[in-house]
Amino acid sequence: MVVSGRAGAGKTILLGQIERALLELHIPVRRFSLSGDAGPLLGLPPPAGQSYAALGQVQTDAARAALPAQGALLVRVTRELSFAGDPPRDNRGQTISPARWAQEHLLQRAPDGVAVLLAVEDPDGLDEQGTELIELRPPTPPRPERT
C-alpha cells in the first residue's frame, strides 16, 4: 500500500503508530526513511564510471538486500531521494521518480508474507495498477463558530 501527502500530512505519525501496533503484536518491523542520499543507508558502493544500467542494477541489488524476510517494511520516501547524487533508476538504468523507485524495488519485490507500506511525499510516476494509493491531507484547524 502507498500513502501520499505533502509535508505535515501525517505520514511519519502514521508510520510510527503502525510500527508500534505491529510490535505490540510481536510482528517484526523494519522501518527507514529514503531521503537525500540513500546510498549509505542501503550500503551502495560509490559509483565509479558505471553505465546507467549498471547503476540501476546496483540500486536494485541494494533494495533487495534491504527487504526483510518476514514481517513488515515501513518506508518514508521524499522527493530528494538520490544515490551518491545519482537519481533513482529502474533496473534498465532509466531515471524514475522516487515514489516509482520504491514501488518497483520495495513494494513489488517484497517476499511473500512481508507487508509493505510506503509513505511518499509525491506520488508522481507511480504505477497505480494493482497498488492501493491513499492520499493524506493535513488536519485542518477548527473553524470558529459564528454567533
Image (cartoon, helix red, strand yellow):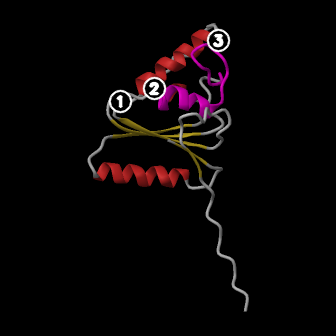
Residue stretch rendered in magenta on the structure: 86-108
Q: Where is residue 1 in the image (x, y as percent from the top left)?
A: 50, 41
Q: Is residue 35 left or right of residue 66?
A: right
Which disc, if any, is residue 143?
A: none
Q: In this view, does 137 lie to the left or right of 17?
A: right
Residue at 44 percent of width and 52 percent of height: 16
Residue 57: in sight, yes or no? yes
The residue that label 1 is drawn on is 112
Number of marks drawn: 3
Please identify the residue farthest to the front as the structure is shown.
129
Q: Is residue 39 left or right of residue 109?
A: right
The residue that label 2 is drawn on is 109
Q: Position of residue 147 (x, y in %)?
A: 73, 92
Q: What residue type is labelled 1?
A: Asp
Callouts 2 and 3 close, C-beta under 8 Å? no
Q: Quadrant of residue 145?
A: bottom right
